Amino acid sequence: MRRTRRLFLLAIVAILAGVGVSYHLQQKITAARPRIVPKALRANVQAAGQDWVYRKEEGGRPIVELRARDMERVEEESARILLKGVELRLFHKGGSEFDLVKSSSAVFREAEGSLFSDGEVQITLGVPAGAEPSGRLLGIRTSGVWFDSATGRARTDKPASFTFDLGSGEAVGATYDPSTRDLQLLSDVKLQWRGRGENTTPMHLEAGGLLYREHESKVYLSSWSRLTRERLTLNAADSVVTLEQGNIRTVDAQKAEGADEYPGRRLRFGAQELHLDLTARSEIEKITGAGQSWLEATTDAGDTMVRADRVTMDFEIRDKASILTRTLVQGSSRLESRPAVRAGQPPRATRILKTEVAEIKMRPDGEQIEQMETHTPGDLDLIPHRPTDPRRQMSAERMWLRYGGKNQLQSFRAVQVATRTLKPAAKGKPEPRPALTWSKDMTAAFDPETGDVTRIEQWNEFRYREGEQEATAAKAILEQAKNLIHLEGDARVWDKSGSVKAAKIVMHQETGDFTAEGNVASSRLPEDKSASGGMLEKDQPVQATAQKMVSTDRNRHIVYEGGAVLWQSANRLQAARVVIDRKEQKLHATGKVVSQLLDKAKPNAPKKDPVLTLVRSEALEYDDQQRIAWYKGQVRLLRENLDVKSRELRAFLNQSKDGSGDSRLDRAFADGDVEILQSEKARTRRGLAEHAEYYVTDERVILHGGYPQMFDSATGNTSRGRKLTYFANNDSLQVDGAPAQPAVNLIRRK
């Protein structure tokens, strides 16, 4: 045991000796080395160091971390820390991400908690803790940046450029708040936004100022803004761009005007408030304008202009292009279409549509209109380019306009419609009254070359009025080239002079001529109140029925065909065909003619049964100036007890101007195989001759020509002579003979 203790003591002594030797050896080595003296601090520099770190926390969570490769603390009025190789980390809430700021040099004022870098600064936003930098906004390069360590806010008034995974840009002046992650670019902003995905067409944004709020995924463009994408350009005041997964999905612009140009087509639009919806590849799929909205489309075919409180344009994406497919206009809408003027072609009408809500559908190419439809009552105005053409205005509950090629109106459909046609005034004449129509349904067709109306069809309670002329029908068709209106189904036309009703009526708008067919019934009021005493009294309305009626020369020439019947009170005329020429004051009737004239009673004369004169024939010619009615072909006149048959008969009507005569018939002359029967009670007188004359006043009958003869059934006597004159009022007979033809009186023996 003692022996072991000695061994421990010897070991301790040996160790101490070794340490002593090592110490003396180290001392010699140290003494041999050159002495390192710390670098002297510059004037006013209190301290200096390397790998300097400043950190600020709140509740154990890092807020700001400032690192520098070199540090100098300068004492002036307030302490400054001069940093080189600066790296600033501004932590987001939660501390999982930070914004990284790098600068070659900076000045840190600890008392103020501010950092200023006058040199180039690189800022990287959204850096994950412990990972490589990534995020929407990757880097900003600028200079003259101030940082607030308390809040982490940064600002600069110098030009700044930035790049990020979706684009790049530049501006003058910027501020950034890491707590809200708001980035503001102060002026002269230019931004190229590529978006995500392959083959995405970039959008170029310019503005007087920009505010990017990451938590809202919105970019606010202020003062003025301009967006450009391929052929699309949008200029506005303030605008708001909304992002979705890094892509621009909507744009809201104030006081905006835009243009979208393609070969052969130019689209311009604007509004007080304009909203754009874009696809994930930043392709436009909808544009909505509100407040004084307008749209102008210009193509080789012409111009289309739209004004409304609200305009919505829908686009279809084809071949990376936005093709306009539909436009909806709402509120005080006005759509104007002006066809292009082409050399060698007639000018076409301008169309103006006014309504509250209208929808425009485009052809597949997006350049030409296919259909226009109103969803509320509207007015369509067709304004001709030629001053000689009529101007048409249409008002309807609903309208559908279909277009052909070259934006040319092809057809029109409307319900609960009213039209107004304004015809140009002839030289030196007043402007004519407008032509007005109404109906529940209407269609119209247009010439593909000129755009002029070629055909209009209206049905269901059709009404028409032009000046004093009016019409109704179940259906109406306008043939513009012929200027004809076809009225079908219970058709009726009237004015202050009369009316016509038929199954079908065809009217000529310019001349007023018309043709009526199918159960025609007409009524013509007297032209004046003067009595004529003729076959057609001027002071009495003329009623007529026929299967067909043709009126020309402003109703001065009228033709009735097919069982025609005309009458004035008891006076009637029947024939297969009747022609009235009011200008020449003549009447022609053919085909089983039957005329009926009723005598007028003399004033203050004893009352007696009226005398009726009935004449049948194959034809009739009446001259009102001469008061002569000339009946031809199998003529038969019946009057009281008188029956006259002949091949022809001329009836001379009374010439009295006041109509006071007691007979419409003054005298009648019959020619050709004349046979006269005069009957009273049981007595009959029968006369034969080639010519006979009958005078109403004294009831005198004269027979001559063709060896006249008269047979008296009461006496059985037959009288012959060159001329026989019979007086019915006194029952006397006068027989005149000739040397070659002596009078003969045959007496029958009893």
Image (tube, rainbow, N blue to C red):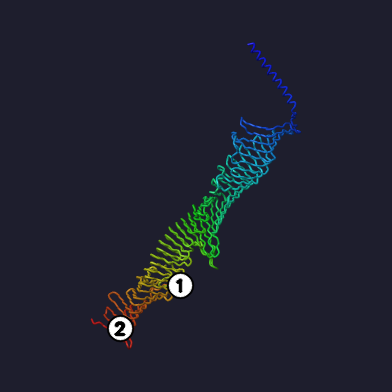
Select label 1 or label 2 by which is in front: 1
The secondary element bearing badge 2 is classed as strand
Residue type (three-letter) at the residue carrying disc 2: Arg
Q: Is residue 715 left or right of residue 318?
A: left
The numbered mark at residue 720 is 2
Q: Viewer-proximal residue, 624 or 723?
A: 624
Disc 1 marks a residue whose amino acid type is Lys
Disc 1, SS: loop
Residue 206 placed where, x, y %? 62, 47
Q: CA distance from mark 1 to mark 2?
A: 46 Å
Q: Quadrant of the N terminus?
A: top right
Q: Picture quarter containing residue 18?
A: top right
Left or right of 255 on screen, residue 623: left
- Residue 134 x %, y %: 59, 39
Nearer the observer, 137 or 541: 137
Graded by Cα atoms within 10 Å as few (under 14), some (14 to 19) or many (20 or more), the crowding at tag 2 reads many
- Rendered location of residue 87, percent (x, y): 66, 36
Location of mark 1 (residue): 583
Give the residue at the far right of this rendering.
43
In-front residue for pair 239/217: 217
Q: Is residue 525 above or below residue 675?
A: above
Q: Quadrant of residue 13?
A: top right
Residue 363, numbered circle = none
